[in-house]
C-alpha cells in the first residue's frame, strides 16, 4: 500500500501515526494492497480556498476527501479493485479548535478526521440519517480498535 503524508500546515505531525492508521483502516476495509492514498495537512488559508472551490462554502473546514478511482471496500471472497484511492486534506488548526471544544487531544481529532476522510474516499456519506449512523458507527469502531491495538503494541 502506498500512503504518503504531506505536512504543509506548520504543525508538528507524527507522520508514522497517520500511515499506521491508514494502513489499519484500509486493511480492515479490504482495500487492494497496492491502493494509493495521500494525506495532506494544510493551513487554514489553503483549506479555505479548497472549501470555497470544491464545496462553495466559506471559511476553512476540518477535512476534505478527493476520490480518484472510486474504489469501494472489498467484499469477503472477492478480489478488491486496484487503483488510486485519492487524497484526504486535513486542517490541523481547525482540528485543534474542535479537539479543544470536545475536550480531547488534537491527535485524537486528527486520527478521527483521517478515518472519516478514508471512509468518504470509499463511498461512505452522512447526508441521510441512516447513512450517518452507518458511517459514524464504522468510523468509531475502526478508530477504537486501532487505538486499542496501538495501546497493546506500546505496552499501555
Image (cartoon, grey):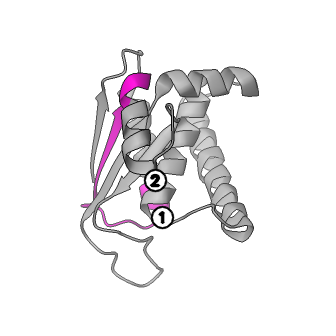
Q: Are marks 1 and 2 in contact (CB under 8 Å)?
A: yes
| Tag nearer the camera, 1 or 2 | 2
Please state the horizontal and vertical placement of residue 63, each as a whole percent of the image.
49, 40
Please indicate whether residue 45 sits to the left or right of residue 60 in the image. Answer: left
Q: Give the numbered dot on residue 118.
A: 2
Q: Quadrant of the C terminus?
A: top right
Q: Is residue 43 visible?
A: no
Mark 1 = which residue? 29
Give the residue at x 72% y 70%.
130
Residue closest to the eye, 47 or 41: 47
Identify the residue shown where x is 48% and y is 49%: 117
Which quarter of the rendered picture does the N terminus lie within? bottom left
Residue in the picture at 65% in, 45% down: 144
Image: magenta residue range: 26-46
Q: Residue at x 73, y 24 (%)?
A: 101
Give neighbour class at mark 2: few <14, some 14-19, many 20+ (Cα, 10 Å).
many
Where is residue 77 shown, x and y percent of the image? Answer: 43, 84
Whether residue 101 is in magenta: the answer is no
Image position of 130 (left or right of 155): right
- Whether residue 142 is visible to the viewer of this picture, yes or no, is yes
Q: Position of residue 61 (x, y in %)?
A: 52, 36
Q: Residues within 10 Å of mark 1 (few under 14, many from 20)?
A: some
State the SS at label 1. Answer: loop
Specify the label residue 108 is tagged with.
none
Q: Is residue 130 left or right of residue 145?
A: right
Q: Eyeballing the image, is 106 above or below 152? A: above
Q: Specify the quadrant of the image occupied by residue 68.
A: bottom left
| Magenta-span inclusion, residue 32 | yes
The residue lying toward the viewer, choosing from 148 and 144, is 144
Which percent across, then down, holds residue 138?
64, 59
Amino acid at each position: 500500500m502506498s500512503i504518503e503524508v504531506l505536512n504543509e500546515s506548520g504543525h508538528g505531525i507524527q507522520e508514522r501515526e497517520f500511515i499506521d492508521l491508514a494502513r489499519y483502516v484500509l486493511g480492515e476495509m479490504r482495500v487492494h494492497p497496492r491502493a494509493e492514498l495521500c494525506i495532506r495537512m494544510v493551513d487554514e488559508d489553503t483549506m479555505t480556498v479548497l472549501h470555497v472551490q470544491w464545496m462553495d462554502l466559506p471559511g476553512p473546514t476540518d477535512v476534505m476527501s478527493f476520490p480518484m478511482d472510486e474504489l469501494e471496500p472489498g467484499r469477503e471472497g472477492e478480489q478488491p479493485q486496484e487503483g488510486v484511492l485519492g487524497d484526504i486534506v486535513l486542517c490541523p488548526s481547525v482540528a485543534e479548535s474542535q479537539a479543544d471544544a470536545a475536550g480531547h487531544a488534537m491527535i485524537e481529532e486528527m486520527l478521527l478526521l483521517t478515518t472519516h476522510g478514508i471512509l468518504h474516499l470509499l463511498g461512505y456519506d452522512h447526508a441521510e440519517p441512516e447513512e450517518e449512523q452507518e458511517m459514524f458507527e464504522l468510523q468509531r469502531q475502526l478508530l477504537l480498535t486501532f487505538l486499542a491495538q496501538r495501546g497493546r503494541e506500546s505496552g499501555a
